[in-house]
Image (spheres, grey):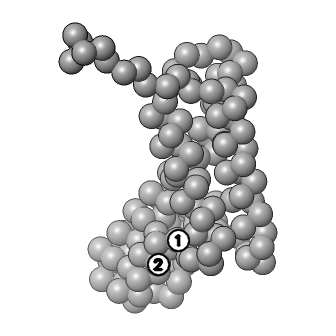
Amino acid sequence: MQIYAYLADLVVALHLAYVLTVIVGLVLILVGWLAKWRWIRHFWLRLIHLLMIAVVAFQAWIGVICPLTHLENYLRKLAGQSGYSGTFIGHLLESLLYYEAPPWVFVFAYTLVAVLILSTLILVPPNWPRRLKPSQQ
């Protein structure tokens, strides 16, 4: 059914958005540090950013394939497609997202990005949430 192919393409788009959020977030933090942007020091933004790459790096270290990849392949099978074929948009997004390389390359890359993001917490520390005084609660 064609709906499954479209859903698989949607999963690929979400997957790409996740990757871009991590990478662009790192770049924006570094540029924002130089430009003295205040918003890059937002505690929850930085914590979520760190957790996003931490999940990816942890999965790579323990050898778990991303759940989004599993979901996409499942939807492609329901659509009667073999893995990583489908509509033009899906194929385009997949060519940006998936590469052929030995597993250690991905473990190294994810770990490197995680270390870089963790380093930004030292280089460009976030503003810690303030506790409310008892009179403000």
> SS for tag 2?
helix
- Residue 110 is tagged as none
Quarter placement of the C terminus: top left
Residue 1 locus on image (x, y percent)? 30, 83
Question: Looking at the image, which residue is at 72% across and 28% down?
Answer: 123
Question: Looking at the image, which residue is at 64% across and 22% down?
Answer: 32
Q: Please give left or right for residue 43 compared with residue 63 in the image.
A: left
| Dot 1 and dot 2 residues touching (CB under 8 Å) | yes
Question: Around disc 1, counting alpha carbons within 10 Å, would you say few (fewer than 14), some (14 to 19), or many (20 or more)?
Answer: few
Residue 27 seen anywhere in this rendered image of the structure: no
Residue type of the residue flagged with mark 1: Cys
Near-viewer residue (128 or 34): 128
Residue 15 locus on image (x, y percent)? 50, 60
Residue 11 seen anywhere in this rendered image of the structure: yes
Q: Please give left or right for residue 42 compared with residue 56 in the image.
A: left
Kindly identify which residue carries mark 2.
70
Question: Looking at the image, which residue is at 72% across and 67% down?
Answer: 107
